């Protein structure tokens, strides 16, 4: 599925739906996260997430996305297998990349199903 097809299936938020969610700086503040997002998430999933969990997850997803983007932008020879949701490259390309990015070993072998969703976010 191409980016345009994926984007067309995405149900975007309109101004009326997000009215009152952001503070004067344009950010979603702690009170909004706790009162409008986490309460619904906790009820729906029967879990007990707090703001610190939200911040941790946002940081993790941002760093993960930046790793994906770095791989694609700065490294020629990489492709994407839409079926397996994995990055593809020759053995030599992987060796070169992983020598410069030793903490990205997971990118070679793991499935990255969330990558397309992170591109939308």
Image (cartoon, rainbow, N blue to C red):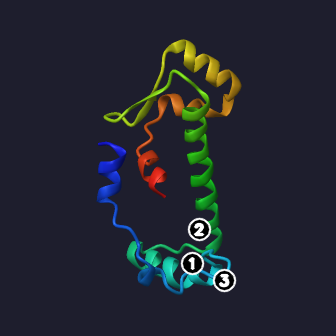
* Mark pair 2, 1: CA separation: 8 Å
* Mark pair 3, 2: CA separation: 21 Å
Residue 39 place in picture, x, y as percent: 49, 82
Residue shown at 49%/85% (left/top)?
19
Is tag 3's residue or tag 2's residue first in the polypeptide sequence? 3
Residue shown at 42%/33% (left/top)?
86
Q: Residues within 10 Å of mark 3 (few under 14, many from 20)?
A: few
Task: Name the element at disc 1.
Answer: helix
* Label pair 3/2, CB-CB below 8 angstroms: no
Where 48 falls versus 120 (above or below)? below
111 left or right, relative to 91: left
Where 67 falls versus 52 (above or below)? above
Residue shown at 56%/47% (left/top)?
65
Q: Quadrant of residue 120?
A: bottom left
72 left or right, relative to 1: right
Q: Which mark is residue 24?
A: 3
Residue 62 place in picture, x, y as percent: 60, 53
Is tag 1's residue or tag 3's residue first in the polypeptide sequence? 3
Task: Name the element at disc 2.
Answer: helix
Q: Which residue occupies the foreground of this view, 58 or 10?
A: 10
Q: Residues within 10 Å of mark 2 (few under 14, many from 20)?
A: some
For the residues carrying marks 2 and 1, which lies nearer the camera in this image? 1
Name the residue beneath numbered marker 1.
33
* Label pair 2/1, CB-CB below 8 angstroms: yes
Name the residue beneath numbered marker 2.
54
């Amino acid at each position: 599925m191409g980016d345009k097809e994926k984007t067309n299936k995405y149900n975007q938020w309109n101004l009326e739906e997000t009215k009152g969610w952001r503070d004067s700086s344009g950010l979603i503040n702690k009170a909004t996260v706790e009162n409008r997002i986490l309460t619904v998430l906790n009820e729906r999933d029967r879990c007990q997430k707090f703001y610190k969990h939200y911040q941790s997850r946002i940081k993790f997803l941002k760093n993960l996305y930046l790793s994906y983007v770095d791989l694609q932008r700065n490294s020629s020879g990489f492709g994407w297998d839409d079926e397996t949701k994995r990055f593809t490259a020759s053995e030599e390309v992987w060796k070169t990349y992983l020598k410069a990015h030793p903490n990205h070993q997971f990118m070679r072998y793991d499935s990255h199903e969330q990558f397309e969703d992170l591109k939308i976010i």
